């Protein structure tokens, strides 16, 4: 249940931020900018990012975990599908045509919703988006359980990607108040959701297996 609800909240929250067009999560923003720079479909960029995240996770846990690798790639595929579905739904509802105040509010709301989703399926720890597994691994294996620190470290690669794309295009896309809210608040929102949203769903992070296999 944590996995399914978390997936749907993550996808719908990201989609709401995209439809509101007032800034999305940093990884999504990096994909938009790379897509614009390279002229490649954003879905392809997101899948490439997912695969790279998955391989990074294998390095971070210091052994090959094939079920984890396959599961994360499958999750990324489902996530991409649901994001596309919810973006179409919110666009049809006219979210993009609302005034600046409401779009800003909905963008921030989308950030909070997808952070709640991340909290749920990270705690379930059955399968998750590879990027969110990266923050989970960083949090518990390298940063003493600090959710905020793990999010900040995880933001370094997309910031670099946006900077590289900017050199090529001289534009920065999909970065606005929602992105700032995500950078500043993701770790806090996730840690708060851990305590307030389904608090009996405790972290199922298998530290020994992650380190030793």
Image (cartoon, grey):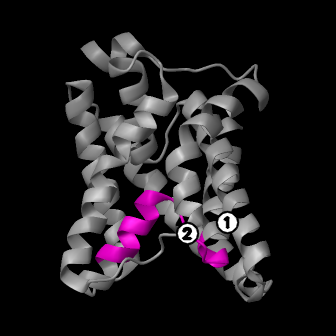
- Element type at marker 1? helix
What is the span of residues highlighted in magenta in the rendered image? 18-34
**Which quadrant would residue 57 be assigned to in this image?**
top left
Seen in the image, is 166 located left or right of residue 19?
A: left
Q: Is residue 213 visible?
A: no
In the depicted structure, whether residue 172 falls above or below residue 68:
below
Closest to the observer, 166 or 210: 166
Alpha carbon of mark 1 to alpha carbon of mark 2: how far? Answer: 7 Å
The percent position of residue 198, horizontal first and vertical second, equals 78, 29
Q: Residues within 10 Å of mark 1 (few under 14, many from 20)?
A: many
| Residue at x 74%, y 66% (from the top left corner) | 106
Residue on which disc 1 sits: 107
- Element type at marker 2? loop
- Marks 1 and 2, the one that precedes in the sequence: 2
Picture disc at residue 23: 2
Q: Are the residues tagged 1 and 2 within 8 Å (C-beta)?
A: yes
Seen in the image, is 182 located left or right of residue 169?
A: right
Q: Residues within 10 Å of mark 2 (few under 14, many from 20)?
A: many
The percent position of residue 132, horizontal first and vertical second, equals 46, 42
């Amino acid at each position: 249940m944590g996995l399914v609800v978390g997936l749907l909240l993550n996808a719908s929250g990201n989609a709401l931020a995209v439809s509101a067009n007032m800034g999305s999560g940093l990884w999504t923003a990096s994909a938009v900018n790379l897509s614009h720079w390279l002229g490649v479909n954003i879905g392809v960029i997101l899948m490439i990012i997912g695969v790279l995240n998955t391989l990074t996770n294998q390095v971070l846990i210091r052994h090959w975990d094939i079920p984890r690798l396959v599961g994360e790639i499958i999750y990324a595929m489902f996530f991409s599908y649901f994001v596309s579905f919810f973006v179409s739904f919110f666009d049809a509802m006219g979210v993009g045509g609302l005034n600046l105040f409401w779009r800003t509010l909905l963008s921030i709301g989308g950030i909070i919703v997808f952070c709640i989703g991340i909290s749920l399926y990270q705690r379930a720890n059955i399968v998750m988006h590879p990027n969110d597994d990266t923050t989970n691994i960083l949090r518990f294996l390298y940063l003493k359980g600090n959710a905020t620190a793990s999010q900040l470290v995880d933001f370094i690669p997309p910031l670099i990607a946006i900077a590289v794309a900017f050199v090529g295009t001289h534009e920065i896309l999909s970065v606005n108040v929602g992105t700032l809210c995500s950078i500043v608040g993701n770790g806090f929102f996730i840690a708060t959701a851990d305590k307030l949203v389904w608090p009996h769903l405790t972290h199922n992070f298998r530290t020994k297996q992650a380190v030793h296999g």
